[in-house]
Amino acid sequence: MKHAATSEAFPDAAHDHAECISTALAAAEDTCRREGLRLTPIRRRVLELVWQNHRPVGAYDLLDQLSRDGKRAMPPTVYRALEFLQGAGLVHRIATLNAFVGCSHPDHAHQCQFLICSDCRTVVELESENIGRSLKREAAALGFQVREQSVELTGLCPECHPAH
């Protein structure tokens, strides 16, 4: 099983997102260079905005932020940027929230499980090969072939849990 320890996975209140953003942008540049993809300024800015915190962000929230930046973007521009970033493995779509988060493991293809705090909306990407294999095995037993997998779990993060 491959995932960050709880203290690393859920950022505390003093967490500085500047390092997350810097790491994500460097990984994006590396991925695009390796795959022969173009990380245009708008795609780069959308990725940067997605990584502003560890909460999912919707396309229209991104559009609002781009407008505040002085960029004249229309919804299709944001959706195309998100589609590119998702296709490149740089962001994930959180289906239950219709929003996007940055991918913590853009260097390799993987199946995701997301831990979503229902209070503060922080999302953490968990990458458990055991969970992925187990789900595929159960699906195969029913004659179902899994093409994509995304598991979303809601609950309370360590900061919002009543014991804290």
Image (cartoon, grey):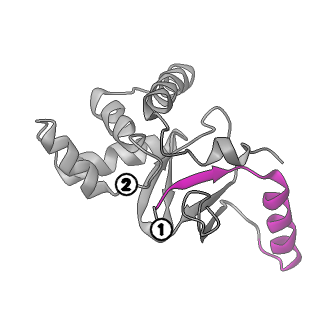
Q: Mark on residue 119?
A: 1
> Residue visible at 16% across and 36% down?
69
- Location of residue 78 with respect to 119 vertically, above or below: above
Specify the quadrant that holds the C terminus: bottom right
Residue matched to label 2: 57
Closer to the N terminus: mark 2 or mark 1? Answer: 2
Type of amino acid under label 1: Asp
Residue 10: within the magenta? no
> Residue visible at 56% across and 63% down?
116
**Is 154 in front, or is 97?**
154
Bin the neighbour count of mark 1 within 10 Å (Cα to Cα): few under 14, some 14-19, many 20 and up: few
**Is 1 in front, or is 6?**
6
- Location of residue 128 with respect to 151 vertically, above or below: above
SS for tag 2? Answer: loop
**Is 138 in front, or is 153?**
153
Type of amino acid under label 2: Val
Residue 139: within the magenta? yes
Magenta residues, start to end? 121-144
Q: Residue furthest front?
A: 164
> Residue visible at 44% across and 41% down?
85
Cα distance in 3D space between marks 2 and 1: 15 Å
Which picture quadrant has residue 71? top left
